[in-house]
Amino acid sequence: ARRVRSEASTSAIDPALVDRIETMYREAALRPTFYVAHAFSDDALAALLAARGYESSEDFGVFVGEVDAILARAARPSSPVRLASPDARAMARALTGVEAGKSGEEDRLAALFAHAELPMRLATVIDRPDHGTETIVAAAIAVLDGDLCSVHELVTASSQRRRGHASALVCALVDAARREGGTRACAQIATANVASETLFRGLAFERVYGYRYMVAPSPR
């Protein structure tokens, strides 16, 4: 589905334009969805959509860092990281298998990854690789678009947190991107996820702007 971005001037929102966009969504049997950035003080689009009964998602922040600064902050990795570029299904299985109860997400992620226009790289941390049975205890993916490395789906098993796995994954993905011409990295983090924000800020990422999605009410 198309996402309508509010980075354009939100001080003069044309309701007729919003009407046309809503019609496009509904003709495609989709609930109209707008991407509303918080980069502007005048939030006219959000006000208009709220008046129409739109529901807001949680807030997210976009964090960006320079690759050299990120790697300069990186501590000596205590977690061995494996990098690979498997198919969409294997990538989804690796991510959803980290935490119990997430297996239901595998099909959704596999379908999403299968339609990705850019190649993705998977990073994993394996527990007890010398004892025959290997278990993925942390994983993340990254996409390199030009010189920008986007880190996504960072997850660590609850029993393995605070061991440096997440930092090791991010730095491994960023370093791999650097070797392919990447100069910047970014991540999108839920505002409520204080632990992730602390991690990325500690690796020289800075918040650039925030956003949320606004979704039309379900048809009755």
Image (cartoon, helix red, strand yellow):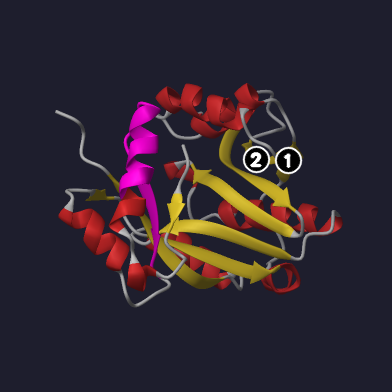
Left or right of residue 94, residue 183 in this image: right
What span is colored magenta in the figure?
19-38
**Where residue 94 sits: x, y (%)?**
58, 30
Q: Residue furthest front?
A: 16
Q: Quadrant of residue 70?
A: bottom right
Magenta stretch contains residue 34: yes
Q: Is residue 128 visible?
A: yes
Tell me the tag on residue 82: 1
Left or right of residue 104, residue 47 in this image: left
Q: Residues within 10 Å of mark 2 (few under 14, many from 20)?
A: many
- Whether 136 is drawn above or below 138: the answer is above
Which element is circle 1 on?
strand
Q: Residues within 10 Å of mark 1 (few under 14, many from 20)?
A: some
**Where residue 31 sits: x, y (%)?**
32, 35
- Whether 94 is drawn above or below 191: the answer is above
Point 56% across, 25% down: residue: 110
**Where residue 144 sits: x, y (%)?**
72, 50
Q: Quadrant of residue 23?
A: top left
Q: Are marks 1 and 2 in contact (CB under 8 Å)?
A: yes
Q: Amino acid at mark 2?
A: Thr
Give the mark nearest the N terminus, 1 or 2: 1
Kindly identify which residue carries mark 2. Answer: 124
Q: Quadrant of residue 87?
A: top right
Q: Residue furthest bottom?
A: 41
Which element is circle 2 on?
strand
- Whether 67 is drawn above or below 188: the answer is below
Point 73% across, 67% down: residue: 67
Point 64% across, 51% down: residue: 169
Indicate the quadrant containing the C terminus: top left, top right, bottom left or bottom right. top left
